[in-house]
Image: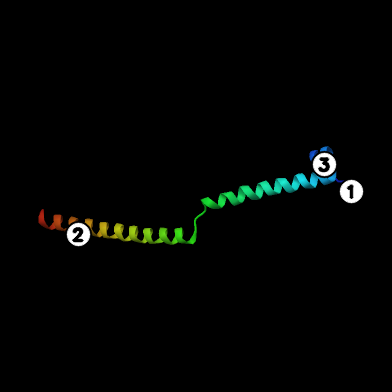
Amino acid sequence: MKRRTSESEMEYGERGAAMTASTEHGERLARLEGAYVHLATKADIAELRSELRSLKWFIAVSIAGAGVIASIIAIIVP
C-alpha cells in the first residue's frame, strides 16, 4: 500500500515533514494550554456553589415573605 505524500513532504522531504508536523503539534499544544486560563479552578467552583446556596436561600425567603404578606392582606381586606 503506497503512502500519500503531504505538501510538506514534497517540499522538505521526510525529515522536514516530521519537523513540520512536530512544529504543528507544538503550536496546537500551546493553543490548548493557553485556553487553560479560561477554565474554572476548584476554588472558583466552590465559590460559585456558596453563592448559589445563598441565592437559593434568598429566593426561598422572598417567596415565603410574599406569601405571608399576601395572607395578611387577605385577612385584613374582607
Residue 20, which numbered label? none
Residue 68, which numbered label? 2
Residue 1, which numbered label? 1
- Earlier sequence position, callout 2 versus callout 1: 1
Neighbour class for label 2 at 10 Å: few (<14), some, many (≥20)? Answer: few
- Earlier sequence position, callout 3 versus callout 1: 1
- Is label 2 in a helix, a strand or a loop? helix
Q: Which amino acid, mark 2?
A: Val
- Is label 3 in a helix, a strand or a loop? helix
Q: Is residue 49 above or below residue 26?
A: below
Alpha-carbon distance for marks 2 and 1?
Answer: 80 Å
Alpha-carbon distance for marks 3 and 2?
Answer: 78 Å
Neighbour class for label 3 at 10 Å: few (<14), some, many (≥20)? Answer: some
**Where is mark 3, residue-wise?**
9
Instruction: State the image coordinates of residue 15 (x, y, percent, origin top left).
Output: 83, 46
Q: Residue at x 19, y 59 (%)?
A: 68
Q: Which amino acid, mark 1?
A: Met
Q: Residue at x 48, y 61 (%)?
A: 42
Tell me if 6 is positioned left or right of 39 in this view: right
Neighbour class for label 1 at 10 Å: few (<14), some, many (≥20)? Answer: few
User: Which mark is nearer the camera, 3 or 2?
Assistant: 3
